[in-house]
Image (cartoon, rainbow, N blue to C red):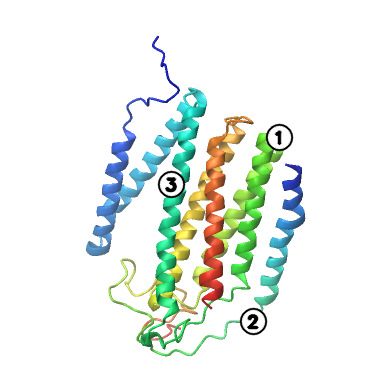
């Protein structure tokens, strides 16, 4: 049997990278078909294949790490760098939307009535549901930290409790935001106010959903004994992502919701 | 973990509770819907939406969202 003389993971050939690329192609061309030719089959196929690739690729990574032992400290270090770089790229993604918001709101044009919020726009009261949402995400940051400490201290019961609470708070946030979107007196079509508001908060909401899904997978793995008290990087990555989502919300709240009203 | 459990049940969750109460108390007043003014910079329809009749946004609420021609109800 061959043994490697290094601590890196030479991954076995996998169909997921190219399948992921194909899924991306189907999704992007599907969007064009939907927007310009009123046809949604390609888009549906694209999104479906994207989900399947994600499920199977990540399932394989769990198998390689948890069951086959390929995630040595060296490999784990690389995974940490990877997650940090990814989150950094997401920060830049949101930076663009904040730039757009300030571009339009710091010097409102005559078409908007020379004011921000524009003429005819009644912004949401930042001290009502948006404040509750802030409390919810901050609380979920505390509960995910409780979960982490419980994992490192091998306290299974509390880890499960704390992570479950975190996920429930995430769902509560999403439900409240959906309700706010429905009840808002302004829409995405209401000029640059609507565009900046809904694109920035919309992408944030998508990230909350992604983060909640990531945490849910971690809960499942926690229950199935995948994590040890000193090796649980999947959980740490989810927790980092969750804190990032919280920080983005704080910026959204302070700028768009509060200053922007 | 004890510190964070304490923070959860003494600070974080009660904080959420206070904000929930605050929302509940403030949500009493029924929305006095603003009068419809057909501003050109709002309710923009450069291109129809790819769903329904193409004229309603994704989270359209007929009670509070006017169409370019006015409230539906």
Figure quadrant of residue A85? top left
Residue A155: image tag: 1
**SS of the residue under disc 1:** loop
Q: Nearer the viewer, mark 1 or mark 3?
A: 3
* Number of other residues with Cα within 10 Å of mark 3, as a class: few under 14, some 14 to 19, many 20 or more: few
Q: Is residue A57 left or right of residue A218?
A: left
Residue at point 48%, 54% (across, down): A207
Residue tagged by mark 3?
A: A86
**SS of the residue under disc 2:** loop
Tell me, yes or no, if residue B59 can be seen here. no
Residue tagged by mark 2?
A: B29
Residue nearest the viewer, comparing B29 with A248: A248
Residue at point 66%, 51% (across, down): A142
Q: Nearer the viewer, mark 2 or mark 1?
A: 1
Is residue A63 depicted above or below A218 in this figure? above
The quadrant the N terminus of chain A occupies is top left
Q: Is residue B5 left or right of residue A185?
A: right
How many numbered marks have been drawn onto this rendered protein structure? 3
How far from the left and from the top, in percent, is residue A203? 44, 60
Tags 2 and 3 touching, CB below 8 Å = no
Asked if labels 2 and 3 share a chain, the reply is: no
């Amino acid at each position: 049997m061959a043994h490697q003389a290094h601590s890196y993971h030479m991954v076995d050939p996998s169909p997921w990278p190219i399948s992921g690329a194909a899924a991306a192609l189907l999704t992007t061309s599907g969007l064009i078909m939907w927007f310009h030719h009123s046809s949604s089959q390609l888009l549906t196929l694209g999104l479906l294949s994207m989900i399947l690739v994600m499920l199977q690729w990540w399932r394989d990574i769990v198998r390689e790490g948890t069951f086959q032992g390929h995630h040595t400290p060296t490999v784990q270090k690389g995974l940490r760098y990877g997650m940090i770089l990814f989150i950094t790229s997401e920060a830049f993604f949101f930076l663009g939307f904040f730039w757009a918001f300030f571009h339009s709101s710091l010097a409102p044009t005559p078409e908007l009535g020379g004011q921000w919020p524009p003429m005819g726009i009644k912004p949401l009261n930042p001290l009502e549901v948006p404040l509750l949402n802030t409390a919810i995400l901050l609380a979920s940051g505390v509960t995910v930290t409780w979960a982490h400490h419980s994992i490192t201290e091998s306290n299974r019961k509390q880890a499960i409790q704390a992570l479950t609470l975190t996920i429930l708070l995430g769902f509560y946030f999403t439900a409240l935001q959906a309700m706010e979107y429905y009840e808002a007196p302004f829409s995405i079509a209401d000029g640059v106010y609507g565009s900046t508001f809904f694109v920035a908060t919309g992408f944030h909401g998508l990230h909350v959903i992604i983060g909640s899904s990531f945490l849910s997978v971690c809960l499942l793995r926690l229950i199935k004994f995948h994590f040890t008290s000193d090796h649980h990087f999947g959980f740490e990555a989810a927790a980092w992502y969750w804190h990032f989502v919280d920080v983005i919300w704080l910026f959204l709240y302070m700028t768009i919701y509060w200053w922007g009203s | 973990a004890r510190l964070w459990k304490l923070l959860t049940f003494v600070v974080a969750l009660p904080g959420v509770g206070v904000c929930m109460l605050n929302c509940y108390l403030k949500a009493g007043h029924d929305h006095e819907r603003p009068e419809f003014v057909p501003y050109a910079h709002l309710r923009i329809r450069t291109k129809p939406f790819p769903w329904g009749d193409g004229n309603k946004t994704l989270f359209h609420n007929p009670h509070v969202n006017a169409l370019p021609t006015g409230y539906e109800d």
